[in-house]
Image (tube, rainbow, N blue to C red):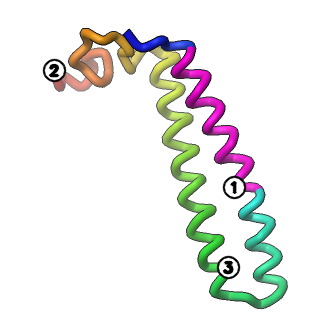
C-alpha cells in the first residue's frame, strides 16, 4: 500500500515548487519582453505554460486522492476507485 499522506505531501510540495518556478519564469519573461529579446520571451512563455499545466495536473491528482477517487492500495487494479469501469 502506498502511504497516502506521504504521497500527498510529496505532490503538494512539488506543486508549490512548480508554482514558485512559474513566478520566476514570468518575471524573466517580462524582463525579456522589456529588453525586446523576443526569442527568450518565446522560450519563457513555453516553459511557463508547461509548468502551469503540470501544476494543474498535480492539483487535480491531489483532489482525486483526497476525494477517494484514486485508490492508493497495492491490491487495487482501478485507477479511479471503479468509477470509470476500467478494471
Residue that appears at 56% across and 13% down: 5
Q: State the residue in front, 65 or 16.
A: 16
Q: Is residue 81 magenta?
A: no
Crowding at label 2, few (<14), some or many (≥20) Cα neighbours within 10 Å? few
Which mark is drawn over residue 87? Answer: 2
* Residues at marks 3 and 1, CA–CA distance in whole angstroms: 14 Å
Q: Under tag 2, what secondary structure?
A: loop
Residue 49 in the image, given as x and y percentages of width and height = 57, 61
Residue 35 in the image, given as x and y percentages of width and height = 82, 87
Q: State the residue in front, 87 or 13.
A: 13
Q: Is residue 16 magenta?
A: yes
* Discs 2, 3 touching: Cβ within 8 Å: no
Q: From the image, give the main secondary structure of the stretch colored magenta.
A: helix
Residue 17 in the image, given as x and y percentages of width and height = 68, 42
Which mark is drawn over residue 41? Answer: 3
- 81 left or right, relative to 7: left
Which of the marked residues, 3 or 1, is nearer the chain's N terminus? 1
Crowding at label 1, few (<14), some or many (≥20) Cα neighbours within 10 Å? many
Residue that appears at 59% across and 53% down: 52
Q: Under tag 1, what secondary structure?
A: helix
Q: State the residue in front, 80 or 14.
A: 14
Which of the marked residues, 1 or 2, is nearer the chain's N terminus? 1
Which residues are drawn in magenta? 6-23
Residue that appears at 48% across and 16% down: 67
Q: Nearer the viewer, mark 1 or mark 2?
A: 1
Circle 1 sits on which residue?
Answer: 22
Question: Can you say which quadrant of the picture contains the C terminus?
Answer: top left
- 76 left or right, relative to 72: left
Amino acid at each position: 500500500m502506498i502511504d497516502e499522506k506521504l504521497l500527498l505531501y510529496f505532490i503538494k510540495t512539488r506543486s508549490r515548487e512548480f508554482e514558485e518556478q512559474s513566478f520566476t519564469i514570468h518575471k524573466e519573461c517580462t524582463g525579456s519582453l522589456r529588453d525586446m529579446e523576443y526569442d527568450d520571451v518565446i522560450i519563457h512563455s513555453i516553459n511557463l505554460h508547461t509548468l502551469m499545466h503540470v501544476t494543474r495536473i498535480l492539483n487535480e491528482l491531489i483532489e482525486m486522492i483526497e476525494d477517494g477517487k484514486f485508490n492508493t492500495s497495492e491490491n487495487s487494479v482501478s485507477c479511479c476507485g471503479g468509477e470509470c469501469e476500467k478494471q
